Image (spheres, rainbow, N blue to C red):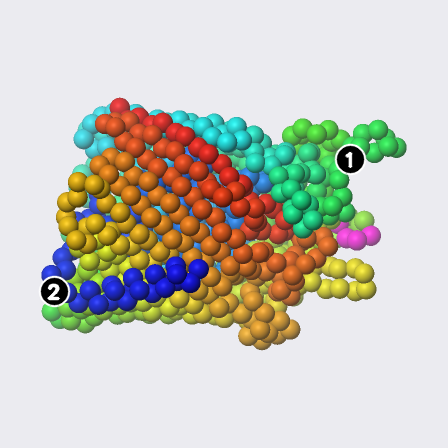
Amino acid sequence: MKHLVLFSILICTFSAALAQKKDSVTLKEVGIKGYRTITGMGHMNEVHDGIIYSGQKNEVLITDSMDANTAQDNPRQVMGRVPGSNYSETEGSGFPSNGIGFRGLNPTQSIETNTRQNGYNIAGDIYGYPESYYLTPLEATERIEVIRGASSLQFGPQFGGVLNYIVKKAPEDKPFEFTTEETGGSYGLMNTFNSVGGTWKKWNYYAFVKAEYQEGYRQNSQMEQAAGFARVEYKANDNFKVGLEYSLLRNLLHMPGGLDDAQFNQNPDQSFRSRNWLVTPWNILALTSEYKVSEKTRFTFKSALNVSSRSIVWRNEDGGPETKDTISTATNSYIPREVEHEYFKSSTSELRMLTNYNLGANEQTLAAGVRFFDGWMKRQEGGLGSTDIGPDFTNYNPGNAYDNDLTFTTVNIAPFVENIFHLGKNLSVTPGFRFEYIKSTATGHVLDSTGNYDIAVNESKPRFIPLAGIAFQYKTSRTTNIYANITQAYTPISYSFLYPMGLDVDAKIDPNLKDINGYNADLGYRGHLKSYFTFDVSGFYMAHNNNIAIESRTNGANTTYFETNVGDAIHIGVEAYAELNVVKLFTKHSRWGTVSFFNSFAYDDAKYVNGLYKGNQSEYAPSVIDRFGITYAYKRFSTTFLYSHTAKSFSDANNTVYSPDAEVGVIPAYTVMDWSATAKIKNYNIKFGVNNLSDARYFTFRTVEYPGPGIIPSIGRTIYLGFGARF
C-alpha cells in the first residue's frame, strides 16, 4: 500500500512541476468535442453539450479505449479509474446491477447518485425511489461522464453527483453498420451483444440487443437477462434535430440470499435459499430535441417516461441467514413464500437554455432551465406466495389482498440558473442557484403488529428548498487549471424510509425522520501534458447533516435495528488520479510499443461529529480506496493489469464489528487483481482476461433484508473470452 500511495504523490508532484512548461500544447480531442482525454480518462471543457462544467470536479471515461470485461459490466475495470468510486458488488446475488457510490456514500443500487442515460433520468423515482435497476450496458456505452457534488445545481440536489452513460452513436458516413460481440466464461457465462446503425439522408438510427445467461458463482444464483435500445434521430437542418429513444430491460434472477460470518468463512459459494426469485421489466421512452436559435444560443429539451416494475417471491427473513428454508415435516412441503410487487410510472422533463454574450471585453456564458418530475409508485407487500420452488409471482391471498398496500407520489418543479463570468483570460467565476419544490404523498393501508389491516395511511409533505453554489477556475496554462467550488446539497426521505419494506423486516423505521442536507466543496489542480501525462489532484469537504443510518439497539438477548437520523457526518478527503505513458515521455515513436501506469487514489475521513455516535466512522465509507494499473500496448494489441485495494468499513452507525445474525458488522478490507487484454485484427477483435485473479474471498455488502439478510458475497475468480466483429 505505501508504495502505491507514494507513487501517486510523486506522480502528482511531478505534474505540478512540469505543468509550467511553456511548450505545453492543447491535445486533439478524441472523436467528440467538449472534453479532453489522452487515454481512457479525461475531463470536460468549461461547457459541453449545453452544460456548464467550469470549476467542477468531473471525469470522462472512454470505454473503448480500455481493456475491460464489458460483457459482464465489471465496474471496477472501467469506473475504477475514478478516485474514490466504491461498488456494492451484488449483481450475482439478486440485484439487477452493481451499485456505485462516491466519497463514502452508500453505493447500494447507486441510490446516492443521479443516474442518467444520454442526459435523461433512468432511475425509478429521482427522490422517492432513486434505485437504478437498469444501467446502460458497457458494451453499448461510448463514454461515462461523472460529475461530483457541484452538479447539484444543474442536475438535482443529490450529494453523490451524477453518472451519465452516453450510448454509442451510429456512423454518419454510411447507411448501415453491424457489430457483434460474443463472450463466454466461467460459471456458464454466455453473452451476445449485437448492434446496427447508420445514416440515411437526414435520418440517423442506432439499436442494440444484449442477452446474457449465467449459472452463477453461488448456488441458486442463475441469471437470465436481456437489454435493448433503439434510437431514431431526424436532423432537419444545422439548427434543429429531434430524436426518439427506447430502452428496455428484462431479467429473471435467482436470489441465493445472505450468509452469516461463519457460513461465509466456511464457503462463500453456498446458499441456503433456493426459492427466492426476482423479475424486473424496465421500460424507458425518451424524447430529445435541440434547437440553435443562433451561433450563441441554443435550447435543449429531454423528456423521459419510465413505466417499469419489480416483483419478488421469497422466503427470506425468518430466522436470519442461519435458518435453512426446509420442508416442513407436518405438511411435507415448504411453507408459503411472500410475494411483493412494485410498479413505477414517472416522467422527467428538462428544458435547458445556453447562451453566450459579451460583457466588457470578455465572452460570458449563461445556462438556465427547469425540471418537471411527476412520479407514481405502488408497493404491495405481504402477498401469499406458493409452496413451490420456481419463479411463481402469483398472490394466492383471497381477493388478491396484500398486508401492506401503499401508493406514493412525488411532484418536483426545479428551476435553475448558472453563469460563467470570465474575469480576464485566465480566471472565471460561476455562481448558480436552484430552487426545488417537492411534494410527496403516501396513501393506502399497512398491517400493524396485532394483525389489524385497517391502519389507513394518508400523508402529504411539501418542501421548498433553495440551493446555491459558486465555482472558480483559473487557467495555469493552456492545458492545466486550478478549480474550486462549494455547493449546497439535499436528499429528501425516500419511500423506503417511510414504511418498512416487508412484514418481517428486521430494521424498524423512525417515524420522525428528517431529510438530509449539507454541502460539497472541492479544491483541485488538473490537466495534461502533451500526450504522455494526465493528472487531477483535489481535496474535498462534504457536510452530510441528519445522516440516516442503521442503529443497533440491544435489549438483553434481543437486538433490533432502527433506521433513524443518527447525527451529522463530515467527509474530508483527497482524490488523486495520475497516468503516465513512460515511453511517450522520452520518444514519440517506439518499435516495441508503449507502457503506461495509472494510479487512482482516495482518502476519506468520514466520521460523525455529533450525536450518540460522535467519532464513529460513517457506514460504507472506507478510509482508503487505491487502484494501480499497468497497460502495455503494441500496435493493435493492449493488455492491462489492475490492482485494487479497499480499506475496511462498517454497515451501521454503531461500527459493529460482529453480530451473530451478520446483518450488521465490519466489511473487512479486500484486495482484488484483474487482468484483461484486447487484440484487434482489421474489423475483428478478441477480448480475454481474468477477473479476481487471486480468487480473493470478500464482500462489499451486509443487509437487514433484500436480497439477504446477512452477508452478500462478491464473485470469485472468473475467466472470459470474447470475439467481436464490425461490418
Q: Position of residue 426 (x, y in %)?
A: 18, 69
Q: Is label 1 in contact with label 2 (beta carbons under 8 Å)? A: no
Q: Which residue is mark 2?
A: 22
Within the magenta stretch, is there residue 448?
yes
Q: Secondary structure at mark 2?
A: loop
Q: Nearer the viewer, mark 1 or mark 2?
A: 2
Is 580 located above or below residue 385 in the figure? below
Q: Nearer the viewer, residue 17 or 32?
A: 17
Quadrant of the image occupied by residue 160: bottom left
Determine crowd level at label 1: few under 14, some 14-19, many 20+ residues with C-alpha closer than 10 A. Answer: few
The amino acid type of the residue labelled 2 equals Lys
Q: Residue at x 16, y 62 (%)?
A: 478
Query: Does residue 579 appear to the left or right of 313 in the view shown?
Result: left
Q: Secondary structure at mark 1?
A: loop
Q: What main secondary structure does the magenta stretch of the protein show?
A: loop
Q: Residue at x 24, y 39 (%)?
A: 634
Q: Which residue is mark 1?
A: 326
